[in-house]
Image: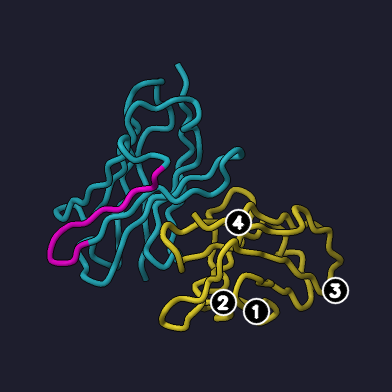
Chain colours: A cyan, B yellow
Amino acid sequence: QVQLQQSGPGLVKPSQTLSLACDISGDSVSSNSAAWNWIRQSPSRGLEWLGRTYYRSRWNTDYAVSVKGRIMINADTSKNQFSLQLNSVTPEDTAVYYCGNDGFDIWGQGTMVTVSS
Amino acid sequence: DVVMTQSPLSLPVTLGRPASISCMSSQSLVFSDGNTYLNWFQQRPGQSPRRLIYMLSNRDSGVPDRFSGSGSGTDFTLRINRVEAEDVGVYYCMQGTHWPPTFGGGTKVEI
C-alpha cells in the first residue's frame, strides 16, 4: 500500500522560496515505472498540476508552463522522497499543495501554504 | 492546454435518488492507444481528492458500485445511482490524455 506523507512550512514570505517534501512508503522514488507529481489547489485556480519527476535510467522532470522558471522538483533516494521548491512566491501562490503518484490514485494529506509577510 | 468544463457548479440531490455530473473537454480524450484517460475524483471537506473512476469507466478499489463513469470523445458523465449522505462533497474530472494533465472546476454535491 503506497502512502505519501508531506512536510514543510505553512507560511512563506513574499519573494522567498516555498519548500515542501513528500515521503514515500510502499514504493521507491526511483522506480522505473512510477512518476511523482505536485499539484496545488486554490479558490482562484482550482486544481492545478505543477510538475513531476521520474526515473528512467536518468532523472527527468516536467513542469507546468505557469510556474516554469520558478519551480524545481527533486528526488532524494536516500530518504525515498521528492521535493518541491517554488521560488519568488507571491500571494497568488497561496494554496493547498499536494503530492501524488502518476495515476493520481495516491495523494498526500495536503499542506496549506500561505504567502504573506 | 485542454480545458475541462463541468456542469452544474452545484448539484442539490435527494437521498436515494440518482444524480449525474457532466464534464466536457475542449479536445477529444481518445489517446493513440485507443484508451480514454478521463478520471473522476471525489473531495470531501478537509480531505485530499480521492480517485473514483479511471480510464473513463473503471471503478477504483473500494468505490461503491453506485458510482459509474461513461462518455466518449469530449463528453463525459459521472453517475451516482442512489445518492447516500456520505456522497456529499466536490467532484472533479481530470484528463490525462494530453499533456499537461488538467482538471475540471468541480461540482459541489449537497443534500
Residue projecting furthest to the front: B27
Q: Chain of mark 3?
A: B
Q: Amino acid at mark 4?
A: Gly
Q: Marks 1 and 2: CB-CB under 8 Å?
A: yes
Residue A102: horizontal and vertical position, in percent? Answer: 37, 64
Q: Chain of mark 1?
A: B
**Placement of A14 over or under B52, stated as above or below:** above
Among the 4 quarters of the image, the one containing residue B81? bottom right
Q: Which residue is mark 2?
A: B56
Q: Which residue is mark 3?
A: B17
Give the left or right position of residue A34, taking residue B16 as reference. Answer: left
Q: Which residue is mark 1?
A: B70
Q: Which comes before the other along the chain, label 3 or label 1?
A: 3
Q: Which comes before the other along the chain, label 3 or label 4?
A: 3
Marks 3/1: CA distance?
19 Å
Please, what secondary structure does the residue beneath circle 2 have? loop
